[in-house]
Image (cartoon, coloured by chain):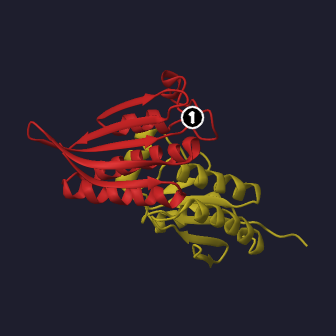
Amino acid sequence: MGVPILKQGEYLVVAIQDELTDTGWHDLRTDLVARAGKYRSRGVLIDVSAMEVMDSFATRMLDGIARMLRFRGAETVVAGMQPEVAFAMAQLGLRLPNTGTALDMDDGFIELQRRTRPVTHVR
Amino acid sequence: MCVEATIPIRHDSDVLSARKAARALATRLRFSSTDLALIATAISEIARNILVYAKSGEMTFEAVEDHARRGIVVIAKDNGPGIADIAQAMQDGYTSGQGLGLGLPGARRLMDEFSIESKAGHGTTIVMKKWTR
């Protein structure tokens, strides 16, 4: 069962569940990078509010996805991280250098808009 | 001291099972939500280390009591290649694999007590404890 990816205008929206296996992460990465190209997405908003643990593997996957998406012209914002998760990640020394972060989904969309200036297509 | 749960670690889904079992026990012991996240994250790191370096092993979770303190003990055992240089493996950022090198030192920071026993060729045993505040 894959993670549902929703298209919202020029953005993609994904909500990650807590129980995502390693295989699930790899599938999500493949799907997102393909879908972002197919829909010419400018940004991807990832809701992590359901995640109760972000270990070094999950963090590395998330940041890697953001780096791949940026190579394809899309920015990534991670939204809704629980305070306990943020605390544990900071203690562990984890970083998300390639994603933006936002407190919730509303702020996430604002942060995505800030990061993705409109493109004027010249024909 | 009673054994509450032993989870074999063989597949990536076992990392989730280990986290779940530990969280259930820690919740019963009335750990705070922050401590629950710290414990679950430490267990996740150690379970992944077992998969990556030893391929398989097991994790046991126990409740302990000591001078009116309650706590959780996590014992992670594997029969993998072992760690030749423990001091080096405990350094932030050192990895002999593909990871970030934060697993062992990170887990030590997240828990209250951490001990590791390993000999090259004889597997690794890690014992970690966290006390309720």
Residue B8 relative to residue A4: left or right? left
Q: Residue at x 51, y 47 (%)?
A: B48
Report x, y in % for residue B101: 55, 35
| For residue B63, above or below residue B23 | above
Left or right: B23, with A121 as reference point: left
Query: In percent of the image, x 55 and y 64: which residue is there?
Result: A46
Q: Position of residue A60 (x, y in %)?
A: 59, 49
- Disc 1 designates what residue? B81
Q: Name which quarter of the figure residue B20 lies in.
A: bottom left
Q: Nearer the viewer, residue B69 or A53?
A: B69
Q: How many marks?
A: 1
Q: In the figure, is residue A30 to the left or right of B86?
A: right
Q: Is residue A90 above or below residue B7?
A: above
Q: Residue A29: percent from the left, percent from the top?
A: 66, 62
Chain A tint in image: yellow
As drawn, the chain in red is B
Q: Is residue B23 above or below residue B129?
A: below
Quadrant showing the C terminus of chain A: bottom right
Q: Residues within 10 Å of mark 1 (few under 14, many from 20)?
A: some
The amino acid on which the numbered mark 1 sits, given as a three-letter code, is Pro
Pinpoint residue B93: horizontal percent, then vertical percent.
55, 31
Q: Is residue B58 visible in the rendered structure shown here?
A: yes
- Residue A114 visible? The answer is no
Quadrant location of the N terminus of chain A in the rendered image = bottom right
Q: Secondary structure at mark 1?
A: loop
Q: Chain of mark 1?
A: B
